[in-house]
Amino acid sequence: MNSRFGSHAELVADDRACVWHPFTQQRGWAQEEPVIIERGEGTDLVDTTGRRYIDGVSSLWCNVHGHAHPRIDAAVRAQLDRVAHSTMLGLTHPAAIRLARRLVDLAPPGLTRVFYSDSGSTATEIALKMAFQYWRQRGEDEARRTRFIALRDAYHGDTIGSVSVGGIDLFHSMYRPLLFDTLKAVPGDIADMGRLFDDHPGEIAAVIMEPLVQGAAGILVHPPGYLRAVRALCDEHGALLICDEVATGFGRTGKMFACEHEDVAPDLLCTAKGLTGGYLPLAATLATEKIYEGFLGEFEEFRTFFHGHTYTGNPLACAAALATLDVFEEERTLERLAPKIELLAELLEPIAARREVAEVRRCGTMTGIELCGYPVDLRMGHRVALEARSRGAIVRPLGDTVVLMPPLAISERDLIRLVEITAEAIDVATAAAPAQLA
C-alpha cells in the first residue's frame, strides 16, 4: 500500500537511513518493522499499510479530544487564512491574547501572567529561571536563594535546567557534569522535604514537582495531602512552589489541573502537551502577579526576563489551544470523563491480581502497570508493547512499566478493548519467558 509520500517499503528504507528517533536505541529499531503512522481518526491511528490502532498513550500523553477533530481542524485552517506566525518579541496577536485570558481564568487562583514557549521542557526551564532571577532581584539577603528542591525520580524535560532538577538516572546521569546541583526529596515523604529546608535555611528558591503523580517515573502516585503539605512548607520557609502540570494538566487526573484536587495554587505553573489537544507545539508558564512585578523596572535596570523562543506563542498553536478549550466546554469533556475513570479502575482490577504484575498505579486516566522483576535484557515492557501493537493498540512502556494514557475522548467500548489488549499482550509476552521471572 502506498501513501502520498511513497510506498511503505521506501519509507522504511529512508527512515532507517536518515532518521534518529528520540529515546530509542537505533540498533534495536533497525531490527524491527516500524509502524509508520499516516493519519489519525478519532482516538485511532492508521499506518501506511492500512492497519488501525487504538492510541493508548495519546500520542505521548498530549492528544485530548481525538485526532482530526473538526472543531480544532477548522480553527487552525481559519488561522492559516490570517497569519501562520508572527514573533511575540515586541509584537502580539489576538490568539495569544485570548488564550492567555482563558488560561488565567482556568488556572488556580493567583496565577495572572502567561509566558509562552514551545514544549514542556522549555516551560519548566522558564519557571526555574524566573524563580532564580526573581530572588536575585529582590535584594542582597534574598539573593542567597539559589537552590532548588526536586523529587527523586522526577522528570521535567530534557533541556539542561530541567535535567538538573530531574532524578531518573537512566535519563539524566550521563549529563551530570553539565548540570547545576539540586536537592532531592523522597517523593511522598514530607518530613524528608522538611529536613532539606531545615538544612538549607534561606537558600531555597523553589520546590519543583509534578503534582499528585510523577509520570515518567512510571506513574508514581503521591499520598493524599502531600501536595498541600509541600505548599505549606514552601509558605513556612518563604520559597516558591513550581507545579509541572505538563503531563497532569488538561484533564488527565480528572480535573483540568491536578493542583485542583488539593486546592493548591502554585507560584508558577507549567503546561504543554494537552494545551493544544495534541495538535501543535505550545507551552505556557503561568506566574503570580508578585513574581511578574519582580521583573518590572526602568530599562537601564535590566530587570527584564531575557528569555524567548522564535515560535513563542505561535498563532496556529494558539488557535488550536483555544479550540481545544472550547471543546472541553462544548463536549463536557471532564464531566463525561468521570464514569470512564471509574470504568478504568474496574477494568484494571483483574490485571493487578496477575502473577506477572507487581503493581498497578493510577491517577485519573494515567495508568502504570508495573511488571514483576524481569531481567533488563528481556525488555519485557517492550515485548508487551509489541504484542499490544499486533492486536491493534499502541502502548509505550517505561522500562517494565506499561503505561496506558488514552485520549480523554476515548469511548467506553474502546477503553474496554484497550485494557483487554493490554492484558492479552502481558499474557503472551510473559508466557514466552516464565522461567526468567526474578
Image (tube, rainbow, N blue to C red):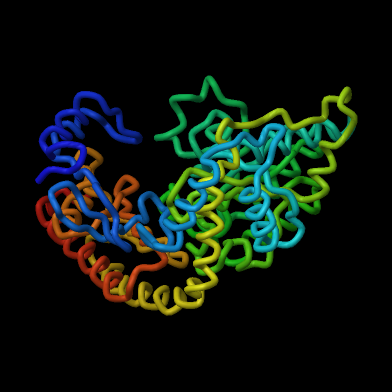
Residue 130 left/right relative to 335: right
What residue occupies the far front of the structure in this picture? 81
Residue 381 left/right relative to 113: left
Residue occupying image coordinates x 55% and y 68% = 255
Residue 17 left/right relative to 143: left
Q: Is residue 172 above or below residue 406?
A: above
Residue occupying image coordinates x 49% and y 56% = 75
Residue occupying image coordinates x 62% and y 29% = 181
Q: Is residue 219 above or below residue 347?
A: above
Residue 192 visible in the picture: no
Of residues 353 and 94, the one nearer the viewer is: 94
Q: Quadrant of residue 366?
A: bottom left
Residue 123 left/right relative to 155: right
Of residues 10 and 222, the one nearer the viewer is: 10
Residue 91 placement (x, y as % from top left): 69, 36
Residue occupying image coordinates x 25% and y 40% = 376
Residue 174 placement (x, y as % from top left): 44, 25
Residue 232 visible in the picture: yes
Residue 234 placement (x, y as % from top left): 75, 51
Residue 347 placement (x, y as % from top left): 30, 74
The total of numbered circles placed on residues is 0
